[in-house]
Image (cartoon, rainbow, N blue to C red):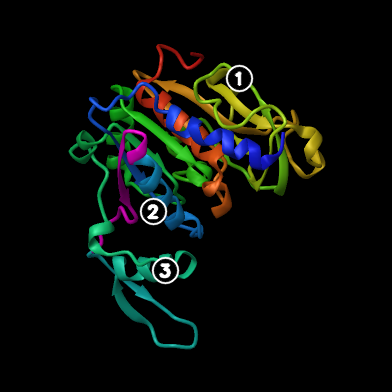
Amino acid sequence: MTLLRRAFLCLPLILAAAAPLSAADKPKRVLLVTHSGGFVHDALGFAEDTLKDIGPKNGLEVTCYRFTEDPTKTVKIKPKDKPEVEKTALEAYSERFRGPTGKTVAIENCGRINKDTLKNFDCVLFFTTGNPVNKEELKDLMEWVNAGGAFAGTHCATDTLYDTAYGDLIGGYFDGHPWHQKIKIKVDDPKHPAAKGFVEGDEITDEIYQFKNFNREKLHGIYSVDNSSIDVKKGKRADNDYAVSWVKEYGKGRVFYTSLGHRKDVWKDPRFQTHLLAGLNWAMHGATSAGQ
């Protein structure tokens, strides 16, 4: 089957990914957090635009936070070959964000993640690096998920909040990207609701992660890399186990993660959109266990 035909066939699946929702239902409220403490992916703004487009068509109300720290605090910046200057954290971040994404960060793009704001959302989706929350805010987030909230992450969400309990929440940490190439997808559980969009043997080009602090006994695999499509010698896992997507339970809450999404063309891919929507939908409406 050609990729063009597969993409065409995926279009109705994008709508079907949120099948449990009906017109009579209130939209599910998704918070997309793109705050970047380190490398700023150029796909961040594109991810916002994509979710703002496909979300309402699938029963989702999407809010985007680009900056989740105190925007008014001052920081000192030393430009190359120029005197040191003092700026607000928001001004400094906006300059960093604008370079790769072409978008600025204004006060209306800011928000804090805590027990009060979390009441306004059904799902929090991280596309982040660094530390988008402080210790107290992370505690609030994890308690919210533990009580039944839905948490999800795309791509660099595993390159976030190292050496904290967040690793237990997300299911693993980024440990390098040995490959940026076309890979084949291996479907770990074709019957799982989040395993929509991609089928066994599908090919996609993206930056491919390997993970540490990753244990399959503590999560449920959705997709992995078909190792026949990569040079496994470039990776450093002794078991050659290179996951792409998984789900897990966290207390009464549910967690969905996909490592795809580095590239803008991946966000445009109907197969990825279907996969993402299906994962979010499972996390918010999911069954009684991660394997269902």
Q: x%, y% of residue 141? A: 31, 35
Residue that numbered label 1 is attached to: 190
In what element is the residue under mark 2?
loop
Q: State how far apart marks 1 and 2 are (Cα).
A: 33 Å
Q: Is residue 274 magenta?
A: no
**Residue for point 31% across, 51% down:** 65
Q: State how far apart marks 2 and 3 are (Cα).
A: 13 Å
Could you tell me if residue 32 is visible in this image?
yes
Check residue 98 in the rendering and tell me which mark sits there, or answer none: 3
Q: State how far apart marks 1 and 3 are (Cα).
A: 39 Å
- Number of the front mark, 1 or 3: 1
Q: Is residue 68 magenta?
A: yes
What is the span of residues highlighted in magenta in the rendered image?
56-71
Check residue 35 in the rendering and tell me which mark sits there, or answer none: 2
- Number of the front mark, 2 or 3: 3
Number of residues whose C-alpha sits closer than 10 Å to that of mark 3, classed few (under 14), some (14–19) or many (20 or more)? some
- Work out whether 223 lies above or below 209: above
Residue type for callout 3: Arg
